Image (cartoon, rainbow, N blue to C red):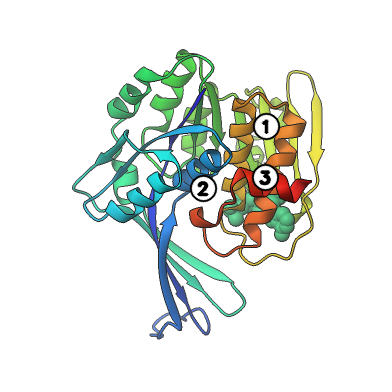
């Protein structure tokens, strides 16, 4: 089957600094690099590295040629990525010596995706395919609704947390994926328990404490511990987990096996610096889990 992702594509600009700047301070960076990022790109790459067929619905500007080429090289079908005159989304990532970060995101083209174009891209989808989406684009609610009507499984990573977006998308969701902070924000904002949410499944990740998957209909919970590793960079751990989990389910894995594969992939990711480019391939994850 196919995993359709409606997702953000960013150019990450990463600056290593002696310390994070104070208001009014000017600092020379010790090091600078650029890379492919954005939650949509990360999750798309994770699903593709897991072996799924992935088609990304997104948008870039005139400056997006290089990140698009990287996505394609990492196995993501980008035929449904629109070219716009608006700048490609980008992130300014400041890292201090202890890898503490401060991040500014300019959504750019990611927030200029037209709902009609995103929905039209799903014309080629068939029942049983998956739509994977997050909150860094426009057009989430319309695309999720169209996907649900077409019989797709809708996996929604409600990050960054935004209540209006969550309310609009939630009625169309099969699997809601949250980190522990987002789970707290969501239940506090809606004034309910996770088990009251109107979705079939909830996946909650807890960083080095692992993850749990809830089948709300059956009242069943599966806990997956994290694998012990020495973390280097946790950026994209949640995206790696979500993309691998969606891909494994698409390939017919049950939830327990999908959780284990996703936890293995996310553990390997945190041992490597970078976002999309640092997501491990399926064979590496299987070797790690042996
Ligand atoms: P991010 O925003 O950095 O992408 P997140 O907050 O969405 O991450 P987390 O809950 O931090 O996601 O992590 C997702 C999964 O990644 C965890 O459930 C776990 O399997 C794995 N993971 C994260 N941190 C570690 C770690 N230090 N060691 C091993 N596995 C980890």
Q: Which mark is residue 2?
A: none
Which residue is found at the position 28% from the left and 25% from the top?
Answer: 116
- Give the labeled residue for mark 3: 184
- Give the labeled residue for mark 1: 202
Position of residue 52 in the picture relative to residue 282 (left or right): left
Q: Earlier in the sequence, mark 1 or mark 3?
A: 3
Q: CA distance from mark 1 to mark 3?
A: 13 Å
Percent across and percent down for residue 13 are 40, 66
Q: For residue 180, say whether it is visible.
A: no
Give the SS element for disc 1.
strand
Percent across and percent down for residue 146 are 41, 19
Position of residue 254 in the picture relative to residue 176 (left or right): right
Q: Residues within 10 Å of mark 1 (few under 14, many from 20)?
A: many
Which residue is found at the position 52% from the left and 85% from the top?
Answer: 18
Position of residue 7 in the picture relative to residue 84 (left or right): right
Q: For residue 151, say whether it is visible.
A: yes
Q: Which mark is residue 160?
A: 2
Q: Earlier in the sequence, mark 3 or mark 2?
A: 2
Give the SS element for disc 2.
loop
Camera-nearest residue between 14 and 249: 249
Q: Residues within 10 Å of mark 2 (few under 14, many from 20)?
A: few
Q: CA distance from mark 2 to mark 1?
A: 16 Å
On screen, 102 above or below 196? below
* Residues marked 2 and 1 touching at CB (< 8 Å): no
Closer to the eye: label 1 or 3 = 1
Task: Report how many numbered discs are placed on residues in the image.
Answer: 3
Which residue is found at the position 47% from the left and 64% from the top?
Answer: 103
Closer to the eye: label 3 or 2 = 2
């Amino acid at each position: 089957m196919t995993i359709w992702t409606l997702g953000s594509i960013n150019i990450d600009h990463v600056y290593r600094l002696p310390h994070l700047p104070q208001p009014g301070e000017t600092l020379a960076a010790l090091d600078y690099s650029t890379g492919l990022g954005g939650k949509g790109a990360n999750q798309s790459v994770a699903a593709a590295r897991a072996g799924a067929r992935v088609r990304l619905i997104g948008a870039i500007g005139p400056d997006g040629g290089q990140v698009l080429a990287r996505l394609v090289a990492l196995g993501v079908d980008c035929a449904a990525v629109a070219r716009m005159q608006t700048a490609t989304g980008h992130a300014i990532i400041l890292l201090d010596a202890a890898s503490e970060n401060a991040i500014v995101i300019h959504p750019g083209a990611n927030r200029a995706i037209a709902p009609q174009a995103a929905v039209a891209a799903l014309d080629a989808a068939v029942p049983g395919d998956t739509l994977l989406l997050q909150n860094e684009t426009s057009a989430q609610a319309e695309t999720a609704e169209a996907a649900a009507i077409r019989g797709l499984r809708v996996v929604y990573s409600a990050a960054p947390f935004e209540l209006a977006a969550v309310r609009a998308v939630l009625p169309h969701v099969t699997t809601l994926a949250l980190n522990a902070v987002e789970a707290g924000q969501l239940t506090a904002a809606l004034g309910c328990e996770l088990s009251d949410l109107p979705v079939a499944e909830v996946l909650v990740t807890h960083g080095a404490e692992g993850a749990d998957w809830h089948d709300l209909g059956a009242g069943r919970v599966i806990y997956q511990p994290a694998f012990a590793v020495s973390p280097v960079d946790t950026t994209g751990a949640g995206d790696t987990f979500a993309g691998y989990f969606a891909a494994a389910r698409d390939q017919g894995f049950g939830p327990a096996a999908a959780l284990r594969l996703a936890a293995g992939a996310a553990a390997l990711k945190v041992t490597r610096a970078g976002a999309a480019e640092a997501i491990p391939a399926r064979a590496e994850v299987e070797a790690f889990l042996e």
